[in-house]
Amino acid sequence: MKDVGEYYFPSSEQLKVIIKDLKGRTLLNTGGEGVNFLTEVTAVEPQLVGDKRGYAYNLTGISLFDEQDEIELYLILPVKPKEIAYRKRIKVSR
């Protein structure tokens, strides 16, 4: 776990979700162009090692995966001074 004392969210965006196909084409970018977030400086949670903070993004009404066997999922905490990112390749089941 990183020492989050120096990290902060510079806006109301607390979770950025990017989904790409295996050719690198972006299927979804929740923090993409034309998306505005309020300026709202907040601390990163959890503050204590071992504590947890859940983040969720609900994707409804969009068929992104109809023609995909696998996707690349990027979960990004857009914090300053350096974002924290997680990348995972996922098989899509139908």
Image (cartoon, helix red, strand yellow):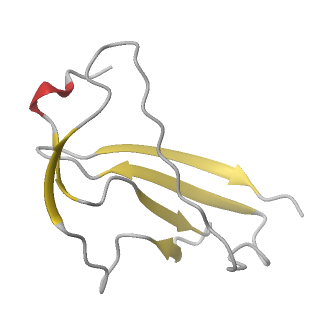
The residue that appears at 70% across and 79% down in the rendered structure is 61
Q: Nearer the viewer, residue 24 or 20?
A: 20
Residue 57 % position (x, y)? 53, 58
Q: Position of residue 84 (x, y in %)?
A: 31, 42
| Picture layout, residue 12 above or below residue 6 | below
- Which quadrant holds the C terminus? bottom right
Residue in the image at 59% along x and 62% along y: 58
Across the whole image, how many numbered discs are drawn on residues?
0
Toward the right, the furthest residue is: 94
Question: Is residue 77 rendered to the left or right of residue 79?
Answer: right
Q: Quadrant of residue 66?
A: bottom right
As drawn, which residue projects farthest toward the bottom?
A: 34
Quadrant position of the N terminus in the picture: top left
Residue 74: % across, % down: 48, 54
* Residue drawn at 67 percent across, 72 percent down: 60
Is 52 above or below relative to 84? Answer: above
Left or right of residue 86, residue 32 in this image: left
Query: Residue 87 in the image: x percent, y percent?
Result: 49, 46
Who is closer to the viewer here, 4 or 40? 40
The quadrant holding residue 69 is bottom right
Residue located at (35% from left, 76% from top): 32
Viewer-closest of 14 and 18: 14
Q: Is residue 46 left or right of residue 20?
A: left
62 shown above or below 86: below
